[in-house]
Image (spheres, rainbow, N blue to C red):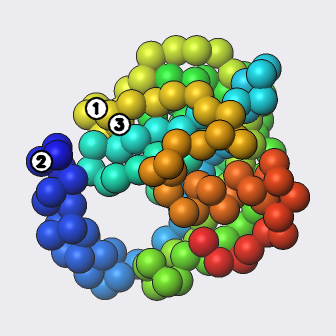
Amino acid sequence: MNWRVRIEPLTRPLFFAVSRASRGMTLGVRAVAVDEEGRVMLVRHTYLEGWWLPGGGVDRGETIGDAAARELFEETGLKAIAPGRLLSVHSNERFFRGDHVLVYRFDAFEVGEMTHRGEIAEARWFDPNALPADAHRSTRARLAEIFGGAPVDPLW
């Protein structure tokens, strides 16, 4: 097991305490990149277990759509060549009070080089109907909403 996975449970509470004290609300994005074969790009972090949709926080002065495109590029090397389409908005209260996550879909991109700086262990394409066994619960839920016709859950 990677050292980041081992220390993440210890460092996360400190990060959340500082974030809660300094911000009233946080905003995050997740990117759903779909290739010509209908597969989706997922990432495996060096500090969390399982497969996730690429994503992260929205920086000051950045639009939400730009943040989704930036995170997609940083974590996978896929550079959006057309704006993403907003699919859904979710409250992440159960995990982090005041947090909201917006999901964007990208269908047009070029393949570039990842700039994740050690955050991503692996990025791979998957058929949305044949996800890896350790795909995160939220990844499965979002893809079921997008590809399986499940109703959009307002909770992350």
Q: Which is more N-terminal, label 3 or label 2?
A: 2
Foreground pick, 9 / 75? 9
Helix, strand or loop under label 1: loop
Q: Residue furthest right?
A: 149
Query: From the viewer's perspective, is 129 left or right of 42?
Result: right
User: On residue 51, which mark appears?
Assistant: none
Per the rendering, the mark at residue 3 is 2
Residue at x 51%, y 28% (from the top left corner): 124
Residue 42 placement (x, y as % from top left) = 54, 38
Instruction: Pinpoint residue 21: horizontal percent, then vertical percent.
Output: 31, 84
Residue beneath the point at 27% across and 43% down: 46
Indicate which disc, 1 or 2, sits on the residue closer to the N terminus.
2
**Disc 2 residue type (three-letter):** Trp
| Crowding at mark 1 (Cα within 10 Å: few <14, some 14-19, many 20+) | few
- Residue 117 vertical position relative to residue 53 in the rendered view, above or below: above
Q: Secondary structure at mark 2?
A: helix
Q: Quadrant of the C terminus?
A: bottom right
Real-space Cα distance between discs 2 and 3? 13 Å
Q: Mark 3 is on which residue type?
A: Ile
Tell me where residue 9 sits by quadrant: bottom left
User: Closest to the observer: 40 or 15?
Assistant: 40
Residue matched to label 3: 120
Q: Residue at x 66, y 62 (%)?
A: 141
**Left or right: 143, with 27 as reference point:** right
Say what secondary structure mark 3 lies in: strand
Q: Amino acid at mark 1?
A: Arg
**Residues at marks 2 and 3 touching, judged by CB atoms closer than 8 Å:** no
Residue named by callout 1: 117
Query: Cα distance, mark 1 to mark 2?
Result: 16 Å
